[in-house]
Every structure is written in structure tokens, then in C-alpha cells.
């Protein structure tokens, strides 16, 4: 099992990761249609941080829902009812769609395009 580890101090805020995600899943460049978000601290130091699903072993997001987590772990589009279920705010709503990182089936495109090392693939213990 793999996960994507983030290193915020290396993030330049270029948004390429979001673009790669939307291209892979929808064939369009639209940073809103992405399961990775680059958050920017506008009010203070302007620092950027890539945020995406941590692929938790124990999926807290599933606890209050009557669903089998294995159905959702590898899915990109989740039911809107999960909107507030992630305590890490790592799933993203755009219009009527909720996006969750599906790791692109094992070869995440965001990691491929990030040239600074702010997101890296790791083997989960
Ligand atoms: S591609 Fe890398 S450096 Fe660029 S915004 Fe995404 S995480 Fe940050
Ligand atoms: S959506 Fe949130 S709680 Fe669920 S596995 Fe991802 S990071 Fe963990």
C-alpha cells in the first residue's frame, strides 16, 4: 500500500499537481477539479501547503457513515454525504462533486509533475 507524503516547506505554490490531477481524471486543466489542493497562507507569510488524503489505515471519514470503507478507498468521486467527514479536511467539494485522492491507481500524476519534492510517494507500513 502506498501513500503520498507532503513536505510543505518545499512547496512553491505552482499548482502543477492540481492541474495534473484534473487532466488525469477529467481531461481538462481545472485546479478546482482536483483531489489535491495547494493551500496558501495569504494573511501571514504566504506559505503554501499541498493537502490531500492521507490514506489513513483507520478511515475516520467512514465512522459516522454506514458504508464499507473498502468501497471508497480507491474511488475518486465520493458521495456528497461525506463532505464533512474528514477531520484533516483532505477531500474537496466542487459544485456537486466530492473528490478524494485515488492515487491514480498506483501511479500518482501529481507526484510525477512536482519538481520540488513537496509531494513524494511512500510505502505505507
Ligand atoms: S506541484 Fe509540488 S511545488 Fe507545485 S504546488 Fe504542487 S506540491 Fe507544491
Ligand atoms: S479522507 Fe481523511 S480521514 Fe479519510 S482516509 Fe483520507 S485523510 Fe484519512
Image (cartoon, grey):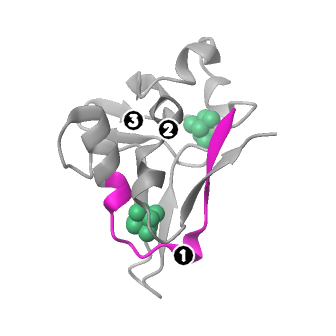
The disc, 2 or 3, on the residue closer to the chain's N-terminal end is 3
Q: Are marks 2 and 3 in contact (CB under 8 Å)?
A: no
Considering the image in quadrants, where does the N terminus appear? top right
Q: Which residue is mark 3?
A: 99
Query: Looking at this view, is 48 or 4 the one in front?
Result: 4
Spatial CA distance of label 1 from label 2 is 21 Å
Q: What secondary structure is marked by label 3?
A: strand
Residue name at image x 42 percent, y 28 percent:
76
Q: What secondary structure is marked by label 2?
A: loop
The disc, 3 or 1, on the residue closer to the chain's N-terminal end is 1
Spatial CA distance of label 3 from label 1 is 24 Å
Among the 4 quarters of the image, the one containing residue 72? top right
Judged by depth in the image, the label closer to the viewer, 2 or 3, is 2
Among the 4 quarters of the image, the one containing residue 69? top right
Q: Residue 89 magenta-drawn?
A: no
Query: Is the residue at mark 1 in contact range of ligand 1, meaning its CB lies under 8 Å from it?
Result: yes
Percent across and percent down for residue 119 are 54, 59
Judged by depth in the image, the label closer to the viewer, 3 or 1, is 1
**Magenta-tinted stretch:** 1-18
Residue name at image x 75 percent, y 31 percent:
58
Residue name at image x 43 percent, y 62 percent:
114
Q: What secondary structure is marked by label 1?
A: helix
Q: Is residue 76 something that shows in the picture?
A: yes
Residue 12 placement, left or right of 94: right
Position of 38 relative to 14 (above/below): above
Q: Which residue is mark 1?
A: 10
Percent across and percent down for residue 54 are 62, 44
Dividing the image into four equal quarters, which quarter contains ligand 2? Answer: top right
Percent across and percent down for residue 68 are 62, 11
Q: Which residue is mark 2?
A: 107
Amino acid at each position: 500500500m502506498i501513500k503520498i507524503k507532503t513536505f510543505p516547506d518545499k512547496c512553491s505554490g505552482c499548482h502543477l499537481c492540481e492541474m495534473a490531477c484534473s487532466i488525469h481524471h477529467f481531461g481538462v486543466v481545472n485546479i478546482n477539479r482536483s483531489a489535491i489542493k495547494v493551500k496558501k497562507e495569504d494573511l501571514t507569510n504566504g506559505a503554501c501547503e499541498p493537502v490531500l488524503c492521507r490514506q489513513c489505515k483507520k478511515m475516520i471519514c467512514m465512522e459516522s457513515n454506514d458504508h464499507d470503507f473498502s468501497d471508497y478507498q480507491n474511488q475518486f468521486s465520493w458521495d456528497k454525504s461525506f463532505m464533512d467527514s474528514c477531520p484533516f479536511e483532505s477531500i474537496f467539494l466542487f459544485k456537486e462533486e466530492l473528490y478524494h485522492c485515488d492515487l491514480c491507481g498506483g501511479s500518482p500524476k501529481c507526484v510525477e509533475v512536482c519538481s520540488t519534492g513537496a509531494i513524494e510517494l511512500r510505502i505505507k507500513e
